[in-house]
Amino acid sequence: MGGAVKKIVEFPIKVVSKALSWIMPQPEIPEFGETDFDSFEQGILLNKQSNDASIPVIYGTRLVGGTRVFMETSGTDNTYLYMAIVLGEGEINDITEIRIDDKAVTWASDLADNTAVEVGSGDSNFYKDSASLIRVEPHFGSDSQTASSLLSTLSSWGTNHRLRGLAYLALRFKWNQDVFSSIPKVQAKVQGKKVVTLASDLSEQTASFSSNPAFCLLDYLRNERYGKGIATANIDLQSFYDASQVAVTQVAPYSGGSNINIFDCNAVLDTTKKIIENTRILLRGCRGYLPYTGGKYSLIIETTGTASITLTEDDIFGGFSLASEDKNNKYNRVICSFVNPDRNFQVDEVQFPPIDDSGLTSADQHATMKTADGGFLLEGRFDFQTLTSPYQAEEMAEVILRRSRDALKFNINASGKAYDLAIGDIVNITHSSVGFSAKPFRVNSISFNEDFTVGLNLIEHQDAHYTWASKTQATTVPTTTLPNPFLIQPPASVTLTDQLISYNDGTVIVALDIAVSASPNSFVSFYQVEYKKASDSDFIIYAQGSGLTHRVLNVIDQETYDVRVKAVGVSGASSTYVTAQRTIVGATDPISNVTDFSCNIVGNEAHLSWEAVTDLDLAYYQVRYSTLTSGAEWQNSVSLIEKVSRPATSVSVPARVGSYLIKAVDKLGNFSLQATVIATNVTAIGNFNNVASATENPNFTGTKTNLTLASDLLRLTDLSATGTYEFASVIDIGASHTSRVTASLTQFSEDPTDLFDSKSGQFDSASGSFDGDAPANENAHLEIALSDDNSTFTAFRNFVIGDYTARYYKFRLVLISRDGTTTPVISALSVSIDMEDRIQSGNDILSGAGTKTVSFTKAYKTANYAVGITGQGMATGDFFLVENKTISGFDVTFKNSSNSAVSRTFDFIAKGF
């Protein structure tokens, strides 16, 4: 039946059927700046403090902040902060990530329901000084969950504090000024509410995680705690199952991309809003309709489809109303807001046509559509709180735009044939007056009139609007390159050395020098330097400042020190520590070798001189002597001068053929590593005569204490005790004389534990000298005791080469192991007692006419001395006779040519020993 395109004939309407629709009228002038959607989504990420705040419902996966419902400190100086943060309604499926102050935490194990877990050692933000700063115990919100064992350590949190039905985090923070500057902000990435899903036979499955919008909406409609509480009998489950299958239609988001669902629901619902508002939010994200038909709620997703009936002119009564798109609801650009996980779950926007629409056909480009619209920008803005995919959001924008540009509205009254239609159904219209031939329309609303006609409000439908078009791959959000003032990089390195410091009064101390290599961070305010003995537990803060070099005075030799340094930023945040360790060797470090050692022989003396050692801890020099003129060694030489005190650089000693050796000694008794040697072989040095000697090797028959003789070698038996070897015999030189005593000692060191094949670990990691440290770890030295009666001896004292006055000589060798593993091994040992020729004389002695006895001032050792006589006033034929030579003197008789004794004056000179 024909009719002008005017308005429909009015009939009384008794019943009107409408449905909640996914598309809502938009304001003619869109709002700019921060919208309610922006504010709400930002609020989701914050922590609020409240005891009566609303509890959100989380569907799908979202990052949320939560509400602090409990907070308390505990421990010495309030070391620990305890906190309970409610995230949302339970039971949720999982918590996949927790962020503290916008930094994702690496946990020691996976997060699980009602299970406490610490920060893993690999987390550089919240694992400090080998300890976790955070412990968390997630609770997923089952109705039967028990109280938190973490919070139950507090008297204020009892077993009845179960928070049943609420998903929450129980947390404990350990105070660290370098990490927490205020109450920590906590965020959790939540896999939301477990929801009941439907199988194809409409059987309800065990509640599980699902982001299918059909099942999320079904949960919300049926839930009596936070939803509408609609009975299942009042819901068309088949329609919800059918809608769920539409939602999981797989599409490629862009060329080469992995398939995604055409719809997902990742939403946080504000339970302070009206239920109908939250329902609209859920419907909007899946292009859904929720008609109430036949006493049941149904879910229809606006997508492609075919008409259930066709209405012709014979089915249409009266006139009709046909209206084209109006300017307020027609767009040539649509902008859709959504929550973008790639931008920390902040609100983001996409638009259709995209900014670069050169890849679209000319008809779909913005400029073309704007020209067709008279040059006006017709822009629509829509918020989708359930969408977290830019591709799903762009698809929504495209559908809205295309739908707005092909949106004929057709209102009619139809015959009873239309009684089977429901809101959201597609119906074909054939009407010759407007040129419709099976043109598809979608039912927006239905009214039932008293004359049994059905009033239909229809809007144009085109399948092409809902065909997924491949998108352009979303650009990767560039990482912010601005430095983080709260993330301080540690110093590059810390280097430790030590040295001796000398004061004007002669005091010498050891100092530990600390050199810090600067942090590359731009926000460093100062460095904090701390140190302690390795045996101590607590560090001492030594310095705080911008300087990179520091000196700790009066450290202890041989003590090991730990040093750590951290950088502190202008924000107060600190870096991790850079550590170093050093064993102090300032005074124990071997003193320098003596240089420029020279010898000058003057008469019977050797004048030794050398360059002063500049080490501050120099105590004295020690000079030794060896009979060898080449190959002399320190350990096989004997002491000549025990101490030549600083600052002397020369000394005179008896001149002997052999080698003189010198070492510097520091204040701890440490010797130079190498002896400096000078040899002399001048044969005219003195005129000594051996009077006694003793060679103990190879049999070493003397008294041995804690010594073992094997293979003609003498060594310590018990390395923990001193060993002594006393010569087999006391040396008697016949009378008390001044004699030159020298000794010869041949030894080497032996450490059975220091053999090459006995070493462990890496060769290059071994400490000490390449040739071993054994000589420095043992000692063998000779001692001497003197007596004139072979009964009372002096105490044994260290032997040095020199002149001794005595008749009886005892010698003892002392062997020491300093480290308990090294022994001196003696292969040769001998002493020699020599007496130097000496001259005695007399002059102007009157002989008398007979035998004259001349007595020496000091007796000789032997009578093998030479005597020279010079007579005064001798006549021709006079002569003298020397007789009866003894060690004490001799007789002389002067005679004339007649062989008669005469008196003469004479001089004499005697040379011997």
Image (tube, rainbow, N blue to C red):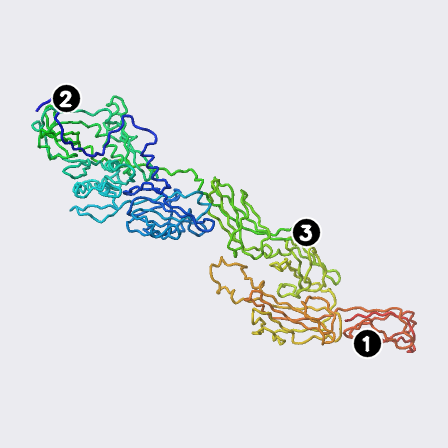
Which mark sits nearer the N-terminus, 1 or 2? 2
Which quadrant is home to the N terminus?
top left
Q: Which mark is residue 666?
A: none
Q: CA distance from mark 1 to mark 2?
A: 172 Å
Q: Can the viewer see residue 417 in this picture? A: yes
Q: Find residue 463 and report its horizontal and vertical position in percent.
A: 17, 33
> Looking at the picture, which amino acid does disc 1 mark?
Lys
The quadrant in which the C terminus is found is bottom right
Mark 1 vs mark 2: give the one in front: 2
Give the spatial CA distance, label 3 vs label 2: 118 Å
The x and y percentages for residue 254 are 26, 38
Q: In the rendered structure, are the residues bearing label 1 and label 2 in contact, judged by CB atoms less than 8 Å apart?
A: no
Kind of residue at badge 2: Lys
Labels 3 and 1: the sequence-earlier one: 3
Secondary structure of the residue carrying tag 1 is loop
Q: Which residue is mark 1?
A: 885
Secondary structure beneath label 3: loop
Q: CA distance from mark 3 to mark 1?
A: 63 Å
Identified by mark 3, the residue type is Asp
Q: Nearer the viewer, residue 401 or 23?
A: 23
Q: Residue 460, how many percent across, how many down?
A: 17, 29
- 500 left or right, relative to 893: left
Between 645 and 17, the one lying in front of the other is: 17
Q: Residue at x 17, y 46 (%)?
A: 202
Residue holding disc 3: 505
The mark nearer the N terminus, 3 or 2, is: 2
Is the residue marked by circle 1 packed among few (<14), some (14-19), or many (20+) residues within 10 Å? Answer: some
Q: Can you tell which mark lies on residue 6?
A: 2
Marks 3,1: beta carbons within 8 A: no
Q: Secondary structure at mark 2?
A: loop
